[in-house]
């Protein structure tokens, strides 16, 4: 029997569910791109995106995804032959290292222990050994979307001390979900994209950068050069040509929801609570030692936007939840045994009732398939939400 009628639920770590009002804002014909309302909307959008990142500094916007943002940052900041240090805590850290190395940069990878956050002490020691300053940039994912590891950005910045390397942070899976204060934390380059915590379909990539690195060392082509986009006086120059018109309207609506209606700090707290509810369920389900467990053992190193889960039979569970209940869970990307791992996203446009439904459906699937677990995880998640919500 199928219970998949109704709106399907997407609980993968991007693209995340898009609010109906964002879709409605995008559903319009294109206006004049040289004058009028779209020009003014774009200028407001650029300021709101700075508010989102916690910066008063530079912003370059591109039509593209997170990989486009990786490349845009690299070709502006680094020249071929420069040395970069990548702090890798999972599949996407490794992918970023490979992408940058493909541009001719000499990449050194400092890999974390499995499902553990980058260690500030190891970073301090490595940079301390670089007495002539060969390392030009330190690259780190605030959240690695595959492992669900969350890095402590202020601690890593402090570990860099007075080393001249730029701190470059990938916030693709964290911006709008986990706390980010670019200026206060001393981040030199921040990158993100539209399709996760920002609640807009894929297609927009963003690179914020500080005045300290504005001159760069790279050999960016005219299209990728971040300076003309930052200093643009005309709408098309912000985007290197025709802007992503409908995406602009959608992003303006999404940022109004996030920054002005809910409030950014409230959104951070909501994501923290939804993550905690997920972890509460996992602790109960795995109480017998044979059920599901969070891949990241240390709570402080867990993302607030996605939780990686080890679960024997996870591939069967994913097939069941989608076919029977209309719920799509994330694949075990980068796991040693992908068929025995999955990811539960709790990012972006997500309420307690929707997420508790996700967790209850997972429990129903484990019962239906006879997968090992202790009962009561969904109830534990509900109790966690109730505790945090108060009366």
Image (cartoon, rainbow, N blue to C red):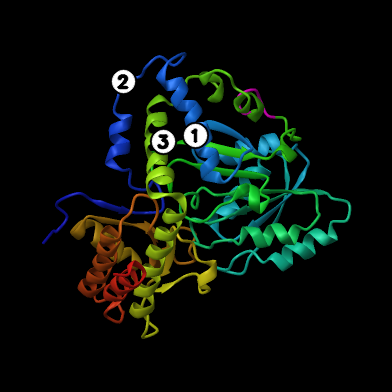
For the residue pair 263 and 28, the one nearer the viewer reads as: 263
- In this rendering, is residue 350 above or below 244? below
Query: Against 303, is 139 above or below?
Result: above
Give the overall secondary structure of the magenta segment. Answer: loop
Mark 1 against mark 2, which lies toward the viewer? 2
Quarter occupied by residue 361: bottom left
Asked whether 65 or 57 is in front, the reply is 57
Q: Which residue is mark 3?
A: 251
The residue that appears at 73% across and 66% down in the rendered structure is 122
Q: CA distance from mark 1 to mark 2?
A: 21 Å
Circle 1 SS class: strand
> The C terminus appears in which quarter of the rendering?
bottom left
Mark earlier in primary sequence (1, 2):
2
Asked whether the viewer can see residue 198, the reply is no
Between residue 83 and residue 27, name the one nearer to us: 27
Residue depicted at x 29% and y 28%: 27
* Residue hosting label 1: 64
């Amino acid at each position: 029997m199928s219970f998949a009628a109704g709106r399907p639920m997407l609980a993968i770590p991007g693209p995340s569910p898009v609010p109906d009002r964002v879709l409605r804002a995008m559903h319009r014909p294109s206006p004049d791109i040289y004058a009028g309302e779209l020009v003014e909307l774009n200028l407001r959008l650029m300021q709101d995106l700075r508010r989102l990142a916690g910066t008063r500094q530079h912003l370059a916007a591109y039509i593209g995804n997170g990989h486009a943002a990786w490349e845009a940052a690299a070709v502006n900041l680094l020249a071929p032959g420069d040395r970069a240090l990548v702090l890798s805590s999972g599949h996407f850290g490794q992918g970023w290292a490979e992408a940058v190395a493909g541009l001719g940069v000499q990449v050194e990878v400092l890999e974390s222990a499995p499902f553990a956050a980058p260690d500030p002490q190891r970073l301090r020691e490595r940079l301390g050994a670089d007495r002539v300053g060969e390392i030009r940039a330190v690259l780190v994912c605030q959240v690695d979307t595959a492992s669900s590891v969350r890095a402590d950005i202020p601690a890593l910045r402090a570990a860099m001390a007075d080393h001249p390397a730029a701190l470059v942070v990938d916030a693709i899976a964290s911006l709008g979900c986990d706390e980010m204060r670019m200026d206060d934390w001393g981040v030199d380059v921040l990158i993100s994209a539209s399709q996760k915590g920002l609640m807009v379909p894929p297609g927009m990539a963003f690179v914020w950068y500080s005045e300290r690195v504005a001159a760069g060392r790279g050999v960016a082509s005219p299209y990728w050069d971040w300076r003309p986009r930052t200093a643009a006086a005309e709408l098309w120059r912000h985007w290197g040509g025709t802007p992503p018109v409908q995406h602009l309207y959608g992003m303006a609506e999404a940022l109004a929801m996030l920054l002005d209606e809910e409030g950014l700090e409230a959104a951070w707290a909501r994501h923290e609570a939804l993550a905690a509810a997920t972890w509460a369920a996992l602790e109960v389900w795995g109480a017998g030692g044979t059920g599901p467990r969070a891949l990241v053992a240390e709570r402080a190193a867990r993302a607030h936007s996605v939780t990686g889960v080890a679960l024997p039979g996870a591939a069967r569970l994913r097939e069941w939840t989608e076919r029977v209940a209309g719920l799509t869970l994330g694949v075990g990307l980068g796991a040693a045994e992908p068929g025995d791992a999955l990811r539960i996203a709790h990012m972006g446009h997500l309420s307690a009732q929707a997420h508790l439904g996700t967790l209850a459906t997972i429990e129903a699937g484990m019962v239906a398939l006879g997968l090992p677990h202790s009962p009561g995880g969904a109830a534990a998640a509900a109790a966690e939400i109730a505790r945090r919500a108060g009366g």
